[in-house]
Image: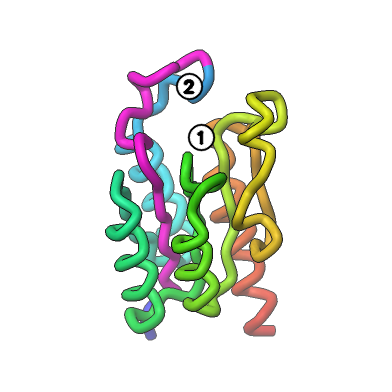
Amino acid sequence: MNPPRILILHGPNLNLLGQREPHIYGSTTLDQINGSLVGLGADLGLDVVHFQSNHEGGLIDRLHAARLDGTRWIIINPAAYTHTSVALRDAIAATDLPFVEVHLSNVYRREAFRHRSYFSDLAVAVISGCGAQGYELALRHAAAELSNRKN
């Protein structure tokens, strides 16, 4: 039996983590985050796959694929699309999969336009302001939820 698949979806500009505004986003790179999540996922008995795109259509296409590729849970950092993309919201809703919305920074301590998310009302949980650790918290939450559903 294959382990449950978790999709980690990273939005625009997250490929620049560790370089872009480290005082806001930290010094951990996206490769380091992904490597940590794949390792943690293996420890938790999960198949963690990750995808990043700076293009809305790429993210939408990956969500469409998740509907059919065995994905059981999604962890998404929509980045700037959090506040702008109805299309991405519609795509994640169409997957009919549970998801956690993650933000590295505390969006409520930032500009007012960042306080509105098109995803939060659909998310099982929202983690904001915990840095890279937020992804790990989200993965542990997904693992616990999947385990609870088996019992």
Q: Name which residue lies at 30% across and 36% down.
A: 15
Instruction: Tell me the magenta residue range.
Output: 4-23
Residue 55's mark? none
The kind of secondary structure element at disc 1 is loop
Q: Judging from the image, what secondary structure is the residue with disc 2 in?
A: loop
Instruction: Say which mark, if any, is on residue 132.
Output: 1
Residue 111 placement (x, y as % from top left):
64, 25
**What's the amino acid at mark 1?**
Ala
Instruction: Pick out the residue farthest to the top.
Output: 23
Q: Earlier in the sequence, mark 1 or mark 2?
A: 2
Mark 2 surroundings within 10 Å by alpha-carbon count, few (fewer than 14), some (14 through 19), many (20 or more) = some
In the image, what residue occupies the spot 41% across and 71% down?
5
Q: Amino acid at mark 2?
A: Gly
- Looking at the image, residue 2 sits to the left or right of residue 122; the answer is left
- Contact, mark 1 vs mark 2 (Cβ under 8 Å): yes
**Relative height, residue 109 to residue 54 (above, below):** above
Q: How did the renderer colour the structure?
A: rainbow
Residue depicted at x 66% and y 55%: 120
Is 143 situated above or below 130? Answer: below
Query: Could you tell me which residue is drawn at 70 percent across and 24 percent down?
Result: 109
| Residue 16 painted magenta | yes
- The residue pinned by badge 2 equals 26
In which quadrant of the rendered image does the N terminus lie? bottom left
How far across and down, in percent of the image, does residue 106 sit? 66, 30
What x and y, as percent, mark residue 46? Answer: 44, 66
